[in-house]
Amino acid sequence: MKWKHLKVRIAGRRVIKTALAVFLTSLICHWLDWPAVFAVITAIVTIEPTVGQSIKKGFIRLPASAIGSGYAVLFIFLFGNSPLTYTLSALFTIITCFRLRLHAGLLVATLTSVAMIEVIHANLFISFFIRLGTTTIGLFVSTVVNMFILPPNYTEKIQTYLDDVLTKTGEELEMIMKQLIIESKRHLNDQEIRDRFADLKTELDQTDRLLSFQEDEAKYHRLDTETKRTFITEKHQLTKLRLIHYHMGNLINTPLENVCWSNAECTNIVEMVETLVDFMKYPSHYKASAYRRQVKQLMNQFWESKKPKEELQDTLFTPEVIILYELLSIYNLVEDIITNQQEQR
């Protein structure tokens, strides 16, 4: 298994495209008898997750590299090949790029600036334009390779992330509900629960980032009908998972004490949650009739919990009402996710 993962990493799309871009860039520079190092550096950093990002950052890196080259030529002219030249070239390149908000090109520009100092031995003016030309070659070649060679496609990876998040969300929900209802010490400040909740948020954000990559990529490579339908379903599923995460956060962060349910009622709710979690882990186990029956039971218990009690309540929203409301909301969202998955497949 480890060797399998290692093979996938080595043969990844971006790795292959980076290697190809470096080869083509250095080959072109060799034909032109220009130093390839600056072009290769630019080519390596220009292979972005999407074509759009490569183009956008390319328009930033080109002027940034020109600034770095310009400072290198200026300070070589003033101070020659000296420590002061390296220092001032790097310093002024960073400051200028930062002030002009050329952040994406700052690293390449600084590397270009300090690397030029060692290799400039001829006409400074010609050296400046050669460095600008090599940078342009690196940007152009990498962008073309990124666009036409193994175009990025994140739909399968997104679905894997979504399935994993749905499973982990179910496990987290089961842990929360058991502590809320069964445990005698309802310590929902338990660090494990909060850590898992934070990890889920991170995974949701990562999935959202992949979706934005795919959406950006669709501007340059039109999705076929099937892939487009899958992409829309994945966006819909992520929205639902974020809402489930929100409702779970309400259960964690709302003080819920003195839950006045009988042992039988508590056991019944926990069993329903376990069934729900099983559906989340294994969507193929989902049965609409059993699911609706559980929802009906929860609804009956919800309306029963909302009935006025004889004793005076400090709030209209009792712990029982809050738990059942959040749980019913989660039930509705999970059903929507599973039914959409089944329709898609």
Image: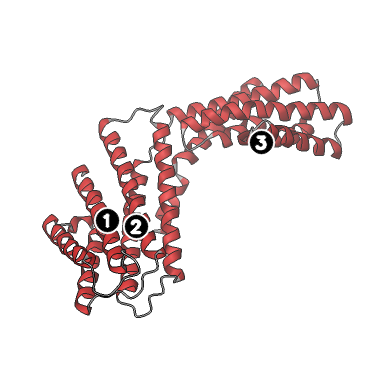
Distance from the alpha carbon under mark 3 to that under mark 2: 42 Å
Distance from the alpha carbon under mark 1 to that under mark 3: 47 Å
Distance from the alpha carbon under mark 1 to that under mark 2: 7 Å
Front-most of residues 76 and 246: 246
Tag of residue 329 = 1
Residue 345: image location, x then y, percent? 20, 44
- The amino acid at mark 1 is Ser
**117 with respect to 216 (left or right):** right
**246 with respect to 31 (left or right):** left
**Image quadrant occupied by the N terminus:** bottom left
- Asked if 95 appears above or below 34 in the picture, the reply is below
**109 with respect to 340 (left or right):** right
Element at label 2: helix
Front-most of residues 123 and 216: 216
- The amino acid at mark 2 is His
Residue 250: image location, x then y, percent? 37, 60
The residue singled out by tag 2 in the image is 247
- Asked if 34 appears above or below 195 in the picture, the reply is above
Mark closest to the chain's N terminus, 3 or 2: 3
Q: Nearer the viewer, mark 1 or mark 3?
A: 1
The residue singled out by tag 3 in the image is 106
Residue in the image at 85% along x and 40% along y: 83
Residue in the image at 63% along x and 26% along y: 62
- The amino acid at mark 3 is Leu
Q: Are marks 1 and 2 in contact (CB under 8 Å)?
A: yes
Residue 321: image location, x then y, percent? 27, 64
The reply to whether residue 69 is in sight is: yes
